Image: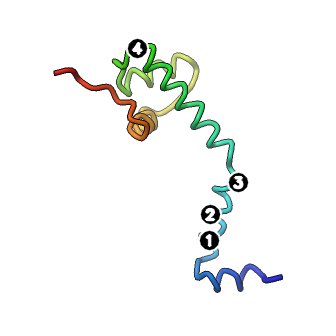
Amino acid sequence: MINLRTWLELVAIPKNSFYEWKAKLSQPEEDLEVNTLIEAIKAIIESSNQSYGYRRVTLALNQRGRKINHKRVLRIMRENQFLCEIPP
């Protein structure tokens, strides 16, 4: 069996990078939280006929008991193309 130090030298990555990725891969509950948050945001937007922006979505989430930062809501809405469009 090959030890960790030899393996890391072989693939030429630092030890701290290995442990960082190991920690990230062992957190599936965070992915579940993000997925439920995306579904909640999607439901709020659909119930408002795509007229809510990130500020109103954040307020709606806070009223439902989910304390979340507006910057995170904006990032999730951008990543999933949930932003509302201003009609001409």
> Dot 1 surroundings within 10 Å: few (below 14), some, or many (20 or more)?
few
Of the two numbered discs 3 and 2 on the same chain, state the one appearing first in sequence: 2
The residue sitting at 59% across, 70% down in the picture is 17
| Local SS, label 1 | helix
Q: Name the residue under label 4.
A: 48
Q: Which amino acid does label 1 sit on?
A: Asn
Which residue appears at 54% of the width and 24% of the height? 40
Distance of mark 1 from mark 3, alpha carbons?
A: 15 Å
Q: On residue 26, which mark appears?
A: 3
Q: Sequence-wise, which precedes: disc 1 or disc 3?
A: 1
**How many angstroms separate mark 1 from mark 2 (CA)?**
6 Å
Q: Distance between the residues labelled 3 and 2?
A: 10 Å
Q: In which quarter of the image is the N terminus?
A: bottom right
Circles 3 and 2 in contact, beta carbons < 8 Å: no
Q: In which quarter of the image is residue 18?
A: bottom right
Can you give x and y, in whole percent of width and height, for residue 9 in the image?
64, 85
Q: Which numbered tag is attached to residue 20?
A: 2
Against 1, residue 19 (above or below) is above
Q: Where is residue 14 in the image (x, y as percent from the top left)?
A: 59, 77
Label 3's element?
loop
Amino acid beneath label 2: Glu
Q: What element carries label 4?
A: loop
Of badges 1 and 3, the one in the foreground is: 3
Which residue does the image show at 45% across and 13% down from the upper left? Answer: 47
Task: Look at mark 1 in the image and give the residue it sits on.
Answer: 16
Q: Which tag, 4 or 3, sits closer to the chain's start?
A: 3
